[in-house]
Amino acid sequence: MTTADLGSPTSATSLAPNEESPLIFITAVFPVKPEHADDWPQISRAFTEACNAEDGCLWFFWSRSVETPTDYVLVEAFRDQDAAVAHVQSEHFRTATSELPAYLTATPRIVNTTLEQDDWSELGEMAVR
């Protein structure tokens, strides 16, 4: 699977940190039915592309678990609370919440938090020299 199949882990938008409106960072684990696991990137493609096209979406991408290949991990970030609200009120979000559960074995598990940063930080302990 290529990065293009799963979305891009890079930010297309660079914003200055804003303490009044912190970045919304979300990670969720989607337990996909075994018969659909290999096709999940295509099944979720329209949703992924629509989310990445949102003005306030900084990134929205999937990774597949090495230990449990039927689990896909979604990593998404929004510039602020307004962008996150617009995301969950979008037509493509409503479509996804209506259609995608049919491909899952259970309700996805989520971590949703705010961060006082606007992009990925480097992992200094693993610096490439």
Image (tube, rainbow, N blue to C red):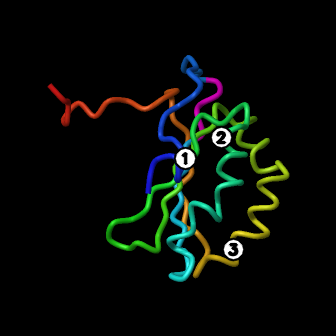
Callout 1: 10 Å neighbours few (<14), some, many (20+)?
A: many
76 to the left or right of 87? left
Q: Residue at x 57, y 28 (%)?
A: 12
Which residue has dot 1 on it? 7
- Examine the image and state in which quarter residue 67 appears: bottom left
Specify the amino acid type for callout 2: Asn
Q: Quadrant of the N terminus?
A: bottom left
First to last magenta residue range: 20-24
In depth, the one of 49 and 22 nearer the eye is 49
Which amino acid type is shown beneath numbered disc 1? Gly
Residue corresponding to mark 3: 101
Q: Residue at x 51, y 73 (%)?
A: 37
Q: Which residue is mark 2?
A: 52
42 left or right of 121? right
Location of residue 35 by image quarter: bottom right
Given the image, on which type of amino acid does mark 3 rest? Pro
Q: Position of residue 59 (x, y in %)?
A: 57, 39
Q: Are marks 2 and 3 in contact (CB under 8 Å)?
A: no
User: Disc 2, disc 1: CB below 8 Å?
Assistant: yes
User: Could you classify mark 3 by the number of other residues whose Cα lies within 10 Å: few (under 14), some (14-19), or many (20 or more)?
Assistant: some
Q: Earlier in the sequence, mark 2 or mark 1?
A: 1
Instruction: Determine which quarter of the picture holds residue 129.
Output: top left
